[in-house]
Amino acid sequence: MAPGGIISKEMIESRVAFADYETATSNTEFRALPSRKTATSFGGNLGTSSTSDVQNLLECPVCMNLMCPPIYQCPNGHTLCSYCKARIHNACPTCRGELGNIRCLALEKVAESLELPCKYQIVGCPDIFPYYSKLKHEKNCKYRPYNCPYAGAECSVTGDIPLLVMHLKNDHKVDMHDGCTFNHRYVKSNPQEIDNATWMLTVFNCFGKQFCLHFEAFQLGMAPVFMAFLRFMGSEDEARQFSYSLEVGGNGRKLTWQGIPRSIRDSHRKVRDSQDGLIIQRNMALFFSGGDQQELKLKVSGRIWKEQ
């Protein structure tokens, strides 16, 4: 990557943000949103039409994402982003001529002058940003779509909460229940088989919101454990408005857990690996099951309430 020219500290920081942005916007979530071709300034006020033309110039012809420095051009003036340049074997995607390492400094300067709305404006984000700050903001915009909370498979579906609720019900066949209290039963005929993680997901409708109850078996270091935890289908700020408790027991003993549900902004694996939930060692789980300890029978009860 040729450095070429003098780049401000803000532009250098924007490159780091853009590397993450490239990965995030290469999936269907970015493609699913309607395109927004508006801007508020470009060295002064411009009409929507002329600014749209400028934005079109800043779209990489290969990945269709907005380009950040370094922006490259072939001898005929066709441009593309640095990420795609590394993938096309030095051939211009437009004219097929040799690309070389020519920087399009003029277009980089144009980009630096733009102020644009967040790409999630269509779903409620009201903010306007300088071109390079916009890319960094969109990575963490609170209006960005949510990832599917389903565990056990890499599901690429994204969307708003109503869409994901229907997706869980129709595509993943997840059980849906109404109410703020629950009893989750887990039975396993051979509790020794824990190498392949066993998990279950149930969605509860409570206070007009949706909560995901996860229950699974996995290895914690060398120790086999069972874990139950709750995730909130919404933002981190909304999640902090609620609390929940979990309880499991038998033979006159019980374990309890109380906490705040984690937002589905945090991945299932992140919550599980942080051990933010009710953890039951296998020996204790078998003790709770009673009998000859040849079959695991656990009942996890819980309650969700809203903080005042």
Image: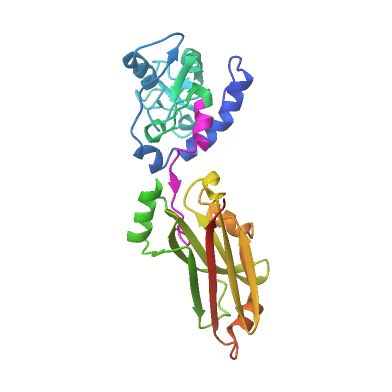
What is the x, y in percent for residue 96?
A: 36, 25
Q: Which of 276 and 294 is in front in this view?
A: 276
- In the depicted structure, whether residue 282 falls above or below residue 293: above
Q: Quarter-wise, where is residue 247 in the image?
A: bottom right
Q: Can residue 33 be seen in this view?
A: yes
Q: Can residue 154 be seen in this view?
A: no
Q: Nearer the viewer, residue 204 or 202?
A: 204
Q: Is residue 91 magenta?
A: no
What is the x, y in percent for residue 208?
A: 42, 53
Q: What stretch is highlighted in magenta?
A: 134-153
Q: Nearer the viewer, residue 90 or 272?
A: 272
| On-image quarter of the N terminus | top right
> In this rendering, would 266 be left or right of 167?
right
Question: Which residue appears at 50% of the width and 14% of the height?
Answer: 109
Q: Does the magenta stretch include residue 135?
A: yes
- In the depicted structure, whether residue 132 falls above or below residue 107: below
What is the x, y in percent for residue 136?
A: 54, 31
- In the depicted structure, whether residue 167 falls above or below residue 59: below
Question: Which residue appears at 42% of the width and 16% of the height?
Answer: 40
> In this rendering, would 278 be left or right of 153?
right
Q: Quarter-wise, where is residue 179 in the image?
A: bottom left
Q: Residue furthest top?
A: 44
